[in-house]
Amino acid sequence: MNAQTALSAAIPFAVPASRWDEAHAATLSPAQLLLYRSNLLGSDLTVTNFGGGNTSAKLTETDPLTGEAVEVLWVKGSGGDIGSMKLDGFATLYQAKLLGLEAHYAGPDDDDKMVGFLPHCTFNLNGRAASIDTPLHSLLPFAHVDHVHPDAIIALAASSGGEDATKAIWGGTIGWLPWKRPGYTLGVMLRDYVRANPGVKGVMLAGHGIICWADTAKACYEHTISLIADAARYLNAAQGSRPAFGGEVVAPNPDRAAIAADLMPRLRGFMTGARRKLGHFSDDAEALEFVGSKDFQRLAALGTSCPDHFLRTKIAPLTLDPARLADDAYLAQQIADYRALYAAYYERCKRPNSPTMRDPNPVVVLVPGVGRITFATDKTTARLAGEFYGNAINVMRGAEAIGAYIALDEQEAFDIEYWLLEEAKLQRMPAPKPMVGKIALVTGGAGGIGAASAARLLKDGACVLLADRDAAAVEDVRAGFAKQFGKDVVRAAVCDVTDEAQIQAAFDICAREFGGLDILVANAGIASSAAIEDTTLDLWNRNYDVLARGYFLTARAAWPLLKRMKEQGGTSVVFIGSKNGVAAATNASAYASAKAAANHLARCLALEGAPAGIRVNTVNPDAVIRGSRIWDGDWRKERAGAHGIDPGSELEEHYRQRSMLKRDVLPEDIAEAVYFLAGEMSAKSTGNMINVDAGNAQAFTR
């Protein structure tokens, strides 16, 4: 590849401004003011990243036992996010009891022990667990305290020139403490530093962030914003017009989206382990600037600095040679080498009581010219890991502008990653839903059966791409699911299953957005009814184009992605067939024979897919009228006409009474069969048909 010289300056740090609304604030209680301040800080990514930072206020409350006025520390609880939390996200603790805990503290070795005392300080039976950073707030004598991790601040805290820069920016008003892992000892160090330097208005915590304070909620918020703005302006001036990271040597590849769609499923297939991975791709300006730079390899190898960043992104990223991305052997070896390096890191650093080694696969994968790919066991965590590494890139850029970037010491990093308190937090997390880590593509995803099947998979944790030729309808369904299940787990693509290019584009979107494919639900369909002498060639072809050719094209496009997951338990294809695919129907030769062709295609694919771990099964519905777009059109009138009944008042009753069980068949009923065939309960079933028709002897499979 040819080296190029960057012509533009480095990406500047954003300079935040106050968003405090005094009129709104005047309507709030003291606790609500703390929440308002916290939400303002946390919703601004120039201030802190998701889940990062904590805020507190020491408020006067009435003791529920004595009725006396007592001072209570309200502090962000463990694991919360200050940008989205509510009042119940704060831990509340008796301040006097917190101060009394120092009697139990004998030195740094007691950090973990001190955490065990925090529940004994709980006020008013609040069940919210207190954060490990609680001592940083309780041991300071100030009414309002903010501790945040903005990129501009961490850039100072993680640079060899950071302490000098802190003095240059703020004189002696902002202090500096060397790196210390969060905990009670850091709280004591901070308290003692402030006592010895009574003029300071905040303290930089090396490698970690900044903590500052004020007498009111508004003053504390605006102080925090002002400090971040000062740091951003200083770093921007220090960088000047010079390109970051030594300048560009690999330009962004114009085909990077297509490269990512091809690369991610192959990487995912090589990341074997207890749980499947989901991917997230980013080609934002920060990522492209970093991965294409001269200093990329040197800095990437150092890993991250801030503990918040590190816990999300692992000890270091995996970097790939863009010239070798088409080589599966190379990719497999790179993943294997990373796993071996991680195991060696664990062995070097483990303590006698360390938890068992966790998943050794990389979280962050960086590719010059392409961008940043992150993998995790769920989509939200994968996205957040990418965002955190984006923060780390910003930190490295700023740190290098004023000195040399300093990452966490390896042993310190390990002690945070395998901290027993962190392990306990992980063990308290609920078990994942059965479909977490699975990726599904549903054709006809805006229709009744397609949407119901997608909803059933989403309900149990799958990620779903809805493919449908109706752009407005599929977007409406996607938006509804995003509100119900979260925007991370659902995507939509406009796709006519008779068009090879549109089909391939849909699968590329699925690969790029989620990392690959585990489940294909081939559901897109049409229906028509006509006597044989009234069946035109066009009508015949339309049925076969969608119901036979469409299923073939969809399965063919899915096959390379599905094969990638053989070593991780295999994959599943579910065809939505029809009762008419196994039982003759009056005046429906085109539709019924096309469905029969699709059903037999499924059997052929089951035979062909078995060596690759691909299971192929069929669900045969009958008369799914309610909620179906097909039954809203001519098909309703045509089938009613074939049976000599009224399409409005008699059709549903006709099909209900025709069934052996005398029951309606709904889209949700089909979705349950799809879920069964897509999941582990049917792991040893392939080439099968399940009739969901309320009973029809004519359709019994033989």
Image (tube, rainbow, N blue to C red):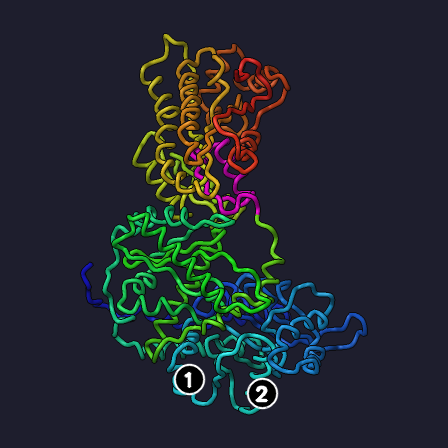
Residue 424 position, x and y percent, is 61, 62
As helix, strand or loop, the secondary structure at mark 2 comes to helix
Q: In which quarter of the view is residue 456 placed?
A: top right
Specify which label sits upstream in the sequence, 2 or 1: 1
Looking at the image, which residue sits at the far top?
533
In this rendering, would 462 be left or right of 32? Answer: left
**Image point (52%, 80%), residue name:** 212
Q: Amino acid at mark 2?
A: Asp
Which stretch did the figure color magenta? 433-462
Looking at the image, which residue sits at the far right?
66
Reply yes or no: does residue 436 show up in magenta: yes
| Residue in front for this viewpoint, 145 or 347 | 347
**Image point (54%, 61%), residue name:** 84
Q: Which residue is mark 2?
A: 192
**Image point (55%, 16%), residue name:** 700
Is 688 located above or below residue 375 in the figure? above
Q: Dots 2 and 1: beta carbons under 8 Å?
A: no
Q: Residues within 10 Å of mark 2 (few under 14, many from 20)?
A: few
Q: Which residue is mark 1?
A: 163
